[in-house]
Image (cartoon, helix red, strand yellow):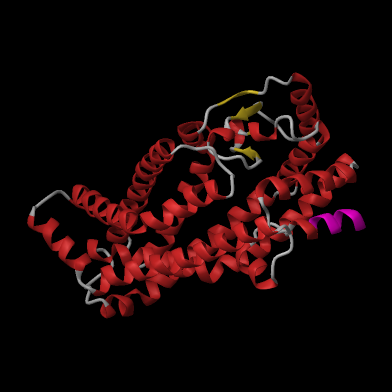
Amino acid sequence: MTGLAKSYSHQKYALSIIDTFYCIALLLIFLGSGLSLSLENLLIGLHLPRFVSVAAYLLVISCLYYLFNLPFNLYSSFILEHKFNLTRQTLKSWLIDQLKSGILGYLLSLILLYSFYWVLGRFAQWWWVVAACCWIIFSVLLAKLAPILIIPLFFKYKKLEDEVLRQRILELADKMQVKLMDVFQIDFSKKTLKANAAFTGMGSSRRVLLADTLQDKYTYDEVVMILAHEFAHYRLKHIIKLIALNSLLTLGLFYLISKTSAYALGIFRLEFLGQLASCPLIFLYFVLFGIVFAPLEALVSRKFEREADRLALKVTADREAFVSLMEKLAAQNLCDRNPHPLIKFFFFDHPPIDERIKIAKTN
Protein backbone atom coordinates (compact mmCIF):
# COMPACT_ATOMS: atom_id res chain seq x y z
CA MET A 1 0.00 0.00 0.00
CA THR A 2 1.31 3.45 -0.87
CA GLY A 3 1.98 6.00 1.84
CA LEU A 4 -0.94 8.12 0.63
CA ALA A 5 -3.41 5.24 0.80
CA LYS A 6 -2.07 4.19 4.18
CA SER A 7 -2.50 7.68 5.62
CA TYR A 8 -6.02 8.01 4.21
CA SER A 9 -7.12 4.59 5.47
CA HIS A 10 -5.72 5.09 8.97
CA GLN A 11 -7.45 8.45 9.31
CA LYS A 12 -10.75 6.90 8.20
CA TYR A 13 -10.40 4.13 10.80
CA ALA A 14 -9.58 6.62 13.57
CA LEU A 15 -12.49 8.90 12.66
CA SER A 16 -14.89 5.96 12.59
CA ILE A 17 -13.83 4.85 16.08
CA ILE A 18 -13.99 8.39 17.49
CA ASP A 19 -17.39 9.01 15.92
CA THR A 20 -18.84 5.80 17.41
CA PHE A 21 -17.69 6.53 20.96
CA TYR A 22 -18.68 10.17 20.62
CA CYS A 23 -22.20 9.09 19.63
CA ILE A 24 -22.40 6.81 22.69
CA ALA A 25 -21.16 9.62 24.94
CA LEU A 26 -23.76 12.08 23.60
CA LEU A 27 -26.59 9.58 24.14
CA LEU A 28 -25.42 8.82 27.68
CA ILE A 29 -25.12 12.53 28.51
CA PHE A 30 -28.58 13.26 27.14
CA LEU A 31 -30.06 10.41 29.18
CA GLY A 32 -28.00 10.77 32.36
CA SER A 33 -28.24 14.56 32.66
CA GLY A 34 -32.03 14.51 32.60
CA LEU A 35 -32.20 16.53 29.36
CA SER A 36 -34.24 13.82 27.68
CA LEU A 37 -36.78 13.79 30.50
CA SER A 38 -36.92 17.60 30.58
CA LEU A 39 -37.67 17.72 26.85
CA GLU A 40 -40.43 15.18 27.28
CA ASN A 41 -41.97 17.17 30.16
CA LEU A 42 -41.83 20.34 28.06
CA LEU A 43 -43.73 18.67 25.20
CA ILE A 44 -46.29 17.14 27.60
CA GLY A 45 -46.92 20.62 28.97
CA LEU A 46 -47.82 21.83 25.49
CA HIS A 47 -50.64 19.22 25.33
CA LEU A 48 -49.79 18.19 21.80
CA PRO A 49 -51.21 15.11 20.05
CA ARG A 50 -49.04 12.03 20.53
CA PHE A 51 -47.83 11.93 16.93
CA VAL A 52 -46.84 15.59 17.02
CA SER A 53 -44.99 15.09 20.31
CA VAL A 54 -43.02 12.16 18.89
CA ALA A 55 -42.17 14.16 15.77
CA ALA A 56 -41.13 17.23 17.79
CA TYR A 57 -39.02 15.20 20.22
CA LEU A 58 -37.21 13.38 17.41
CA LEU A 59 -36.64 16.66 15.55
CA VAL A 60 -35.01 18.30 18.58
CA ILE A 61 -32.66 15.44 19.42
CA SER A 62 -31.80 14.90 15.73
CA CYS A 63 -30.85 18.57 15.31
CA LEU A 64 -28.84 18.57 18.55
CA TYR A 65 -26.97 15.43 17.53
CA TYR A 66 -26.24 16.82 14.07
CA LEU A 67 -24.88 20.09 15.49
CA PHE A 68 -22.65 18.36 18.03
CA ASN A 69 -21.44 15.89 15.40
CA LEU A 70 -20.93 18.51 12.67
CA PRO A 71 -17.14 18.93 13.14
CA PHE A 72 -16.51 15.18 12.73
CA ASN A 73 -18.95 14.94 9.86
CA LEU A 74 -17.48 17.91 8.01
CA TYR A 75 -13.93 16.66 8.37
CA SER A 76 -14.55 12.99 7.54
CA SER A 77 -16.90 13.42 4.58
CA PHE A 78 -15.66 16.69 3.07
CA ILE A 79 -12.30 18.01 4.26
CA LEU A 80 -10.56 14.64 4.31
CA GLU A 81 -11.85 13.71 0.85
CA HIS A 82 -10.52 17.01 -0.54
CA LYS A 83 -7.24 16.57 1.31
CA PHE A 84 -6.60 13.34 -0.58
CA ASN A 85 -8.04 14.60 -3.90
CA LEU A 86 -10.91 12.14 -3.88
CA THR A 87 -13.66 14.65 -4.61
CA ARG A 88 -14.46 17.84 -6.48
CA GLN A 89 -17.66 18.50 -4.54
CA THR A 90 -18.19 22.11 -3.46
CA LEU A 91 -19.11 23.08 0.09
CA LYS A 92 -22.50 24.28 -1.15
CA SER A 93 -23.21 20.93 -2.79
CA TRP A 94 -22.09 19.12 0.37
CA LEU A 95 -24.39 21.23 2.53
CA ILE A 96 -27.33 20.57 0.21
CA ASP A 97 -26.65 16.83 0.41
CA GLN A 98 -26.45 17.11 4.20
CA LEU A 99 -29.85 18.81 4.25
CA LYS A 100 -31.37 16.16 1.97
CA SER A 101 -29.92 13.26 3.94
CA GLY A 102 -30.94 14.89 7.22
CA ILE A 103 -34.55 15.32 6.14
CA LEU A 104 -34.66 11.82 4.67
CA GLY A 105 -33.09 10.29 7.78
CA TYR A 106 -35.50 12.17 10.00
CA LEU A 107 -38.58 11.01 8.07
CA LEU A 108 -37.45 7.37 8.00
CA SER A 109 -36.56 7.47 11.69
CA LEU A 110 -39.93 9.02 12.50
CA ILE A 111 -41.77 6.21 10.72
CA LEU A 112 -39.75 3.58 12.57
CA LEU A 113 -39.96 5.29 15.95
CA TYR A 114 -43.68 5.92 15.75
CA SER A 115 -44.32 2.33 14.66
CA PHE A 116 -42.19 1.17 17.61
CA TYR A 117 -44.27 3.17 20.10
CA TRP A 118 -47.50 2.08 18.41
CA VAL A 119 -46.59 -1.61 18.63
CA LEU A 120 -45.34 -1.20 22.19
CA GLY A 121 -48.72 0.18 23.27
CA ARG A 122 -50.80 -2.55 21.64
CA PHE A 123 -48.87 -5.82 22.05
CA ALA A 124 -47.94 -6.13 25.68
CA GLN A 125 -46.26 -9.56 25.77
CA TRP A 126 -45.03 -10.13 22.22
CA TRP A 127 -44.36 -6.52 21.21
CA TRP A 128 -40.72 -7.31 20.44
CA VAL A 129 -41.71 -9.88 17.78
CA VAL A 130 -44.20 -7.52 16.10
CA ALA A 131 -41.79 -4.57 16.25
CA ALA A 132 -38.97 -6.62 14.73
CA CYS A 133 -41.25 -7.83 11.91
CA CYS A 134 -42.32 -4.25 11.15
CA TRP A 135 -38.71 -3.06 10.96
CA ILE A 136 -37.69 -6.01 8.77
CA ILE A 137 -40.56 -5.44 6.31
CA PHE A 138 -39.76 -1.73 6.20
CA SER A 139 -36.08 -2.38 5.43
CA VAL A 140 -36.97 -4.76 2.57
CA LEU A 141 -39.41 -2.24 1.08
CA LEU A 142 -36.77 0.48 1.39
CA ALA A 143 -34.27 -1.67 -0.53
CA LYS A 144 -36.81 -2.09 -3.33
CA LEU A 145 -37.71 1.60 -3.48
CA ALA A 146 -34.21 3.05 -3.02
CA PRO A 147 -33.33 3.15 -6.76
CA ILE A 148 -36.61 4.92 -7.51
CA LEU A 149 -37.06 7.30 -4.58
CA ILE A 150 -33.75 7.78 -2.75
CA ILE A 151 -30.81 7.58 -5.17
CA PRO A 152 -32.32 10.22 -7.53
CA LEU A 153 -32.32 12.69 -4.61
CA PHE A 154 -28.52 12.69 -4.63
CA PHE A 155 -27.49 11.61 -8.12
CA LYS A 156 -28.75 11.86 -11.67
CA TYR A 157 -28.61 8.80 -13.82
CA LYS A 158 -29.47 8.02 -17.39
CA LYS A 159 -29.46 4.98 -19.62
CA LEU A 160 -25.91 4.00 -20.54
CA GLU A 161 -25.11 5.54 -23.92
CA ASP A 162 -22.22 3.20 -24.71
CA GLU A 163 -24.29 0.62 -26.58
CA VAL A 164 -21.40 -1.84 -26.92
CA LEU A 165 -20.83 -1.95 -23.17
CA ARG A 166 -24.56 -1.99 -22.47
CA GLN A 167 -25.06 -5.02 -24.72
CA ARG A 168 -22.14 -6.85 -23.11
CA ILE A 169 -23.66 -6.27 -19.67
CA LEU A 170 -27.10 -7.39 -20.82
CA GLU A 171 -25.57 -10.51 -22.40
CA LEU A 172 -23.75 -11.25 -19.15
CA ALA A 173 -26.99 -10.82 -17.21
CA ASP A 174 -28.73 -13.22 -19.56
CA LYS A 175 -25.87 -15.71 -19.24
CA MET A 176 -26.09 -15.54 -15.42
CA GLN A 177 -29.92 -15.63 -15.49
CA VAL A 178 -30.32 -12.19 -13.99
CA LYS A 179 -33.35 -10.10 -15.00
CA LEU A 180 -32.52 -6.42 -15.43
CA MET A 181 -34.64 -3.34 -15.95
CA ASP A 182 -31.67 -1.74 -17.76
CA VAL A 183 -28.12 -0.38 -17.38
CA PHE A 184 -27.68 3.20 -16.19
CA GLN A 185 -24.78 5.61 -15.74
CA ILE A 186 -24.77 7.69 -12.58
CA ASP A 187 -23.03 11.06 -12.21
CA PHE A 188 -20.72 10.00 -9.39
CA SER A 189 -17.97 12.42 -10.45
CA LYS A 190 -19.93 15.43 -9.15
CA LYS A 191 -19.32 14.24 -5.59
CA THR A 192 -16.44 11.78 -5.59
CA LEU A 193 -13.61 10.60 -7.82
CA LYS A 194 -13.83 7.05 -6.47
CA ALA A 195 -15.00 4.29 -8.79
CA ASN A 196 -18.03 2.17 -8.08
CA ALA A 197 -20.80 0.13 -9.63
CA ALA A 198 -23.93 -1.41 -8.19
CA PHE A 199 -26.61 -3.95 -8.94
CA THR A 200 -29.46 -2.50 -6.95
CA GLY A 201 -33.18 -2.76 -6.38
CA MET A 202 -35.47 -5.74 -6.08
CA GLY A 203 -37.95 -7.31 -8.48
CA SER A 204 -38.99 -4.97 -11.30
CA SER A 205 -36.77 -2.16 -9.95
CA ARG A 206 -33.55 -4.20 -10.33
CA ARG A 207 -30.97 -2.29 -12.36
CA VAL A 208 -27.26 -1.76 -12.94
CA LEU A 209 -25.74 1.59 -11.92
CA LEU A 210 -22.30 2.40 -13.32
CA ALA A 211 -20.40 5.37 -11.90
CA ASP A 212 -19.21 7.77 -14.58
CA THR A 213 -15.82 7.66 -12.82
CA LEU A 214 -15.35 4.27 -14.48
CA GLN A 215 -15.49 5.87 -17.92
CA ASP A 216 -12.24 5.94 -19.92
CA LYS A 217 -10.29 4.35 -17.03
CA TYR A 218 -11.53 0.79 -17.18
CA THR A 219 -11.72 -1.59 -20.13
CA TYR A 220 -14.92 -3.30 -21.15
CA ASP A 221 -13.57 -6.55 -19.74
CA GLU A 222 -12.91 -4.91 -16.36
CA VAL A 223 -16.38 -3.36 -16.19
CA VAL A 224 -17.94 -6.69 -17.15
CA MET A 225 -15.94 -8.32 -14.36
CA ILE A 226 -17.38 -5.84 -11.84
CA LEU A 227 -20.90 -6.75 -12.92
CA ALA A 228 -20.14 -10.47 -13.02
CA HIS A 229 -19.21 -10.14 -9.34
CA GLU A 230 -22.43 -8.24 -8.56
CA PHE A 231 -24.58 -10.70 -10.49
CA ALA A 232 -22.86 -13.55 -8.66
CA HIS A 233 -24.26 -12.23 -5.38
CA TYR A 234 -27.73 -12.58 -6.87
CA ARG A 235 -27.11 -16.05 -8.31
CA LEU A 236 -25.71 -17.28 -4.99
CA LYS A 237 -28.69 -15.81 -3.11
CA HIS A 238 -26.41 -13.69 -0.93
CA ILE A 239 -28.96 -10.87 -0.73
CA ILE A 240 -31.63 -13.20 0.65
CA LYS A 241 -29.15 -14.71 3.09
CA LEU A 242 -28.08 -11.28 4.33
CA ILE A 243 -31.71 -10.27 4.77
CA ALA A 244 -32.26 -13.45 6.80
CA LEU A 245 -29.18 -12.75 8.95
CA ASN A 246 -30.16 -9.13 9.54
CA SER A 247 -33.70 -10.24 10.35
CA LEU A 248 -32.43 -12.64 13.01
CA LEU A 249 -30.20 -9.94 14.47
CA THR A 250 -33.10 -7.47 14.52
CA LEU A 251 -35.29 -10.01 16.27
CA GLY A 252 -32.48 -10.68 18.75
CA LEU A 253 -32.03 -6.98 19.42
CA PHE A 254 -35.70 -6.40 20.20
CA TYR A 255 -35.74 -9.49 22.40
CA LEU A 256 -32.73 -8.11 24.27
CA ILE A 257 -34.50 -4.78 24.72
CA SER A 258 -37.60 -6.53 26.08
CA LYS A 259 -35.55 -8.48 28.65
CA THR A 260 -33.15 -5.77 29.83
CA SER A 261 -34.93 -2.45 29.34
CA ALA A 262 -36.48 -2.42 32.83
CA TYR A 263 -32.99 -2.38 34.37
CA ALA A 264 -31.68 0.18 31.86
CA LEU A 265 -34.68 2.46 32.46
CA GLY A 266 -33.98 2.41 36.19
CA ILE A 267 -30.40 3.59 35.64
CA PHE A 268 -31.63 6.73 33.87
CA ARG A 269 -34.64 7.29 36.16
CA LEU A 270 -37.13 6.56 33.41
CA GLU A 271 -40.47 4.87 34.08
CA PHE A 272 -41.30 2.84 30.98
CA LEU A 273 -40.02 2.16 27.47
CA GLY A 274 -42.99 3.82 25.77
CA GLN A 275 -42.27 7.30 27.08
CA LEU A 276 -40.60 9.84 24.79
CA ALA A 277 -37.60 10.25 27.07
CA SER A 278 -36.63 6.63 26.42
CA CYS A 279 -35.92 7.36 22.74
CA PRO A 280 -32.14 7.90 23.21
CA LEU A 281 -32.02 4.63 25.17
CA ILE A 282 -33.48 2.79 22.17
CA PHE A 283 -30.85 4.42 19.93
CA LEU A 284 -28.16 3.42 22.44
CA TYR A 285 -29.27 -0.22 22.22
CA PHE A 286 -28.93 -0.08 18.43
CA VAL A 287 -25.45 1.48 18.56
CA LEU A 288 -24.09 -0.97 21.14
CA PHE A 289 -25.70 -3.97 19.46
CA GLY A 290 -24.23 -2.83 16.16
CA ILE A 291 -20.73 -2.63 17.64
CA VAL A 292 -20.97 -6.14 19.08
CA PHE A 293 -22.34 -7.81 15.96
CA ALA A 294 -20.65 -5.75 13.24
CA PRO A 295 -17.66 -8.17 13.12
CA LEU A 296 -20.04 -11.11 12.58
CA GLU A 297 -21.81 -9.33 9.72
CA ALA A 298 -18.45 -8.35 8.22
CA LEU A 299 -17.21 -11.95 8.49
CA VAL A 300 -20.27 -13.27 6.66
CA SER A 301 -20.00 -10.50 4.07
CA ARG A 302 -16.33 -11.30 3.37
CA LYS A 303 -17.26 -14.94 2.87
CA PHE A 304 -19.94 -13.97 0.36
CA GLU A 305 -17.54 -11.63 -1.45
CA ARG A 306 -15.02 -14.45 -1.92
CA GLU A 307 -17.76 -16.71 -3.28
CA ALA A 308 -18.89 -13.97 -5.67
CA ASP A 309 -15.29 -13.46 -6.85
CA ARG A 310 -14.91 -17.16 -7.58
CA LEU A 311 -18.17 -17.36 -9.52
CA ALA A 312 -17.35 -14.20 -11.49
CA LEU A 313 -13.97 -15.66 -12.43
CA LYS A 314 -15.61 -18.94 -13.42
CA VAL A 315 -18.23 -17.26 -15.62
CA THR A 316 -15.87 -14.82 -17.34
CA ALA A 317 -12.72 -16.99 -17.34
CA ASP A 318 -10.76 -13.73 -17.33
CA ARG A 319 -8.27 -13.72 -14.47
CA GLU A 320 -6.23 -10.98 -16.09
CA ALA A 321 -9.18 -8.57 -16.14
CA PHE A 322 -9.93 -9.33 -12.49
CA VAL A 323 -6.37 -8.59 -11.36
CA SER A 324 -6.09 -5.39 -13.38
CA LEU A 325 -9.51 -4.29 -12.07
CA MET A 326 -8.42 -4.79 -8.46
CA GLU A 327 -5.19 -2.88 -9.04
CA LYS A 328 -7.04 0.08 -10.56
CA LEU A 329 -9.69 0.16 -7.84
CA ALA A 330 -7.03 0.07 -5.12
CA ALA A 331 -5.21 3.01 -6.68
CA GLN A 332 -8.27 5.11 -7.51
CA ASN A 333 -10.07 4.57 -4.18
CA LEU A 334 -6.93 4.66 -1.99
CA CYS A 335 -7.73 1.23 -0.57
CA ASP A 336 -5.92 -0.40 2.34
CA ARG A 337 -4.60 -3.37 0.38
CA ASN A 338 -3.24 -5.39 3.28
CA PRO A 339 -4.68 -4.23 6.64
CA HIS A 340 -3.76 -5.46 10.11
CA PRO A 341 -5.91 -8.49 11.08
CA LEU A 342 -7.74 -6.46 13.74
CA ILE A 343 -8.54 -3.73 11.25
CA LYS A 344 -9.81 -6.35 8.81
CA PHE A 345 -11.87 -8.00 11.58
CA PHE A 346 -13.70 -4.81 12.57
CA PHE A 347 -13.82 -2.69 9.41
CA PHE A 348 -13.70 -4.85 6.28
CA ASP A 349 -16.90 -6.25 4.76
CA HIS A 350 -14.85 -7.16 1.64
CA PRO A 351 -11.61 -9.15 1.61
CA PRO A 352 -8.60 -6.81 1.23
CA ILE A 353 -7.46 -6.19 -2.34
CA ASP A 354 -4.21 -8.14 -2.02
CA GLU A 355 -6.10 -11.15 -0.66
CA ARG A 356 -8.59 -11.05 -3.55
CA ILE A 357 -5.78 -10.86 -6.11
CA LYS A 358 -3.95 -13.77 -4.45
CA ILE A 359 -7.08 -15.94 -4.48
CA ALA A 360 -7.68 -15.10 -8.16
CA LYS A 361 -4.13 -16.02 -9.12
CA THR A 362 -4.11 -19.31 -7.22
CA ASN A 363 -7.55 -20.62 -8.26
Q: Residue at x 57, y 40 (%)?
A: 192
Which of 333 and 123 lies nearest the eye of the viewer?
A: 333
Which of 213 and 50 lies nearest the eye of the viewer?
A: 213
Q: Residue at x 66, y 41 (%)?
A: 195
Task: Please state the total of marks drawn on the protein image.
Answer: 0
In which quadrant is the C terminus drawn?
Answer: bottom right
- In the displayed structure, 34 sits above or below 248; it is below
Residue 76 in the magenta stretch? The answer is no
Picture quadrant of residue 337? bottom right
Residue 357 in the magenta stretch? The answer is yes
Picture quadrant of residue 3? bottom right
- In the displayed structure, 4 sits above or below 18; it is above
Position in image of residue 167 (x %, y %): 78, 23
Instruction: Mark yes or no: residue 109 visible.
Output: yes
Q: Is residue 104 left or right of residue 273?
A: right
Instruction: Mark yes or no: residue 134 visible.
Output: no
In which quadrant is the N terminus drawn?
Answer: bottom right
Q: Is residue 338 left or right of residue 103?
A: right
Position in image of residue 202 (x %, y %): 59, 38
User: Most prominent secondary structure in the magenta stretch?
Assistant: helix
Position in image of residue 198 (x %, y %): 65, 39
Q: Residue at x 35, y 68 (%)?
A: 125
Position in image of residue 89 (x %, y %): 50, 38
User: Which portion, as a residue range, is magenta?
Assistant: 356-363
Which of 197 and 316 lies nearest the eye of the viewer?
A: 197
Picture quadrant of residue 28? bottom left
Q: Is residue 302 left or right of residue 55?
A: right
Which of 67 and 32 lies nearest the eye of the viewer?
A: 67
